[in-house]
Image (tube, helix red, strand yellow):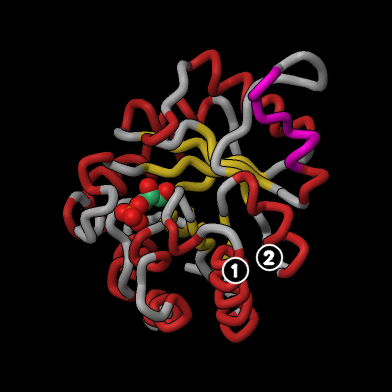
Amino acid sequence: MGLPFILLNYKTYLQGTGQEAVKIAKACQAVSEESGIEIAVAPQLPDIYRVALEVDLPVFSQHLDGIGAGSFTGQIFGGSLKAAGASGTLINHSEKRLTLAEIEASLNAAKKFGFKTVICTNNVPTTAAAAILEPDYVAIEPPELIGTGIPVSKADPEIVRASVKAVSSLKPEVKVLCGAGISKGEDLKAALELGAKGVLLASGIIKAEDPKAALEDLISLV
Ligand code: G3P
């Protein structure tokens, strides 16, 4: 099955804000170095630079706009993310939903800077559609399970299995992640057994008393 890819989304949780963002990233780096598992972090925009400065991990943005350099006030330019140390981005997270045209524009902008790209989706048809755009990953996350602690790999295994099947039949080079409610070792194991290549998660780690211990539990059955 190979080692999974783990992408930790900090969202706007206080526990992952400012200097706390660095502390969690350092915990991720320690677990990644101990296990050999690739762990990427997606802090909030203003924390990307401080995190990238302190850790040797892939640092992702939680969003990127489909714009170039110029007069785009308030938008997120891939060039500034790259300069801040980011090397990847989420696109279309359920908490930052985009139109199809915006998804494509963000993806093209991200690719211009050589970013790893993860398009977030909410069901099998949108997962298939996202795969056609050829991101590096699609991340299937049923919104109703996000933040619940009820893992998608247990609550709705079929959505993961069907997403993997759809993507592999359309764009086999695109890898599938799953997310929503993932926190324990058995959740990650179940996800990998369903054909996912990794997980996208947030609260199970960011809000944990001991994020490093929570990460170690997450990978304990890999
Ligand atoms: O981006 C991942 C996120 O939406 C999943 O949230 O808290 O259920 O791990 P959570």
Residue depicted at 32% across the width and 34% down the height: 122
Q: How many marks?
A: 2
Q: Is residue 196 left or right of residue 125?
A: right
Q: Specify the label residue 25 is tagged with.
A: 1
Give, as a single range, the part of the protein colored magenta. Answer: 73-81
Answer few, some or many: residues within 10 Å of disc 2's Cα (few below 14, many 20 plus, some between 14 and 19).
Answer: many
Q: Is residue 69 above or below residue 95?
A: above
Look at the image and tell me whether residue 51 can be seen. Answer: yes
Quadrant where the image shows the C terminus: bottom left
Look at the image and tell me whether residue 173 can be seen. Answer: no
The type of residue carrying mark 2 is Leu
Q: Is mark 1 within 8 Å of ligand 1?
A: no
Q: Quadrant of residue 109?
A: top right
Answer few, some or many: residues within 10 Å of disc 1's Cα (few below 14, many 20 plus, some between 14 and 19).
Answer: many
Q: Are marks 1 and 2 in contact (CB under 8 Å)?
A: yes
Badge 2 is on which residue? 57
Residue depicted at 71% across the width and 59% down the height: 50
